[in-house]
Amino acid sequence: MLYLLRETATARRRRTVLSVIVLLFLLSFAQAVSAQDDHDKPIPILTGNVGTFSFVTGGQNLIDTQINPVLLVPLGDRWLIESRAEFEGEFQRPPGGGPYAGPVDKHVDYAQVDYIANPYLTVTAGRFLTPFGIFNERLYPVWIRFLQPDPLILPIRTAPSDGAMFRGGFPVSAHANMNYALYVSATSIGIESVDSERHVGGRMGFFFPGPRLEVGSSWQKTLQDDRRNAFGFHMSWQPSKLPMGLRSEYAHSFEGSGYWAEGAYRLSQVRFWQKAMRRTEFVARGQQFFVGAIGPDAEDGLGLPGANTREADFGVNYFLRDGMKGIFSYGRQFSSVGNFNQWSFGLAYRFLIPLGRTGASPEAQ
């Protein structure tokens, strides 16, 4: 038992050291690039978000605090290094009472090199967010998402990939553009903080600028273990005449299937109390999950619900200032294992720090 505890502690230290080394390397590289004399070229940027939230699920309170720094390092006009790390602490009171305590998770979400081959193709190598659906890649940051609780189907085929990706877009007509992503991932090197699996997949979508509507589909095939296929569909719509956004996803896999649909309405067009109300946003989400072929009692290892589940969430976001918003939401979950309420409230903050001089050089003015 003592040996196992020592081994676990050693593995944790390795993961922590790896995360720190990656961040220090990227920051040092960014500072070296920012020291260039030619100020006309793009400069590195450190951005990201910070959030602290309280989730009350079935009467149990969880305090979630996270920092997600994103580093962007451009190299000339065609190369870009980008990386995002996640430091998340989840703190709860022990069953018998006492102070809040819990684990602090540290891992690298992505660390990739992008080569912009032409306006229609970008080649990516390294660790990247798997482009299955839209929530994982576009809507996951706490500042961007409408509601802080994750969708029930989020764990389906959205683990980070270690490999290569080809993506881009081009117009197919005067009224539609197509975007695509093709990727292949290899098995991880055995370090938990950068783990991945062998799979291949792709995503294709069509965007219609007139109605500001996007629809698309995703596919992924696992190349290890059960070698199963997974499919998904997504939709996003932002009407030009209303301060509103609608989006939804559907995913089907061996482990389970389900959907979510959500919307947000900003009160910027309300005439009474306009100065205060224009900062307010009402949000709502409905979703459902169906247990897959593995059965409700099997360990899927993904964090999916263990039974058929329905959930409805409602919330309010208030933008206190540029870069900071307060969130509040209430939800109710229904399943055969029990029904319970979910409350959440907290603050989300986004930041952006240029790592170099901004503006054009005197010779270019």
Image (cartoon, rainbow, N blue to C red):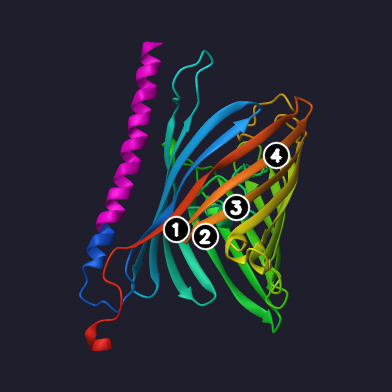
Mark 4 — residue?
331
Q: Is residue 333 above or below residue 40?
A: above
Farthest residue in the front direction?
272
What is the C-alpha distance between the residues marked 1 and 4? 39 Å
Q: CA distance from mark 3 to mark 4?
A: 15 Å
For marks 3 and 1, the one nearer the N-term is: 1
Element marked by disc 2 = strand
Q: Is residue 124 left or right of residue 181?
A: left
The residue identified by callout 3 is 317
Earlier sequence position, callout 2 versus callout 4: 2
| Along the viewing direction, whichever of 274 and 135 lies nearer the viewer | 274
Q: Is residue 5 magenta?
A: yes
**Residue tagged 1:** 125
**Disc 4 residue type (three-letter):** Gly
Secondary structure of the residue carrying numbered label 1: strand
Choose mark 2 or mark 3, whichever is in front. 3
Q: Residue 89: x percent and y percent?
A: 44, 35
Q: Nearer the viewer, mark 3 or mark 1?
A: 3
34 vs 151, left or right, is: left
The residue range painted magenta reads: 1-28
Q: Label 2, label 4: how many angstroms apart (C-alpha)?
A: 37 Å
The percent coordinates of residue 218 (x first, y second) are 67, 56
Q: Position of residue 174 (x, y in %)?
A: 69, 84
Marks 1 and 3: in contact by CB < 8 Å?
Answer: no
Is residue 235 something one can see in this rendering? Answer: yes
Going by the numbered disc 3, the residue's amino acid type is Asn
User: Looking at the image, can residue 111 be seen?
Assistant: no
Q: At label 2, which amino acid type do we have? A: Met
Query: Identity of the amino acid at label 1?
Result: Ala
Give the farthest residue toward the top.
1
Of label 2 and label 3, which has the lower sequence position? 2
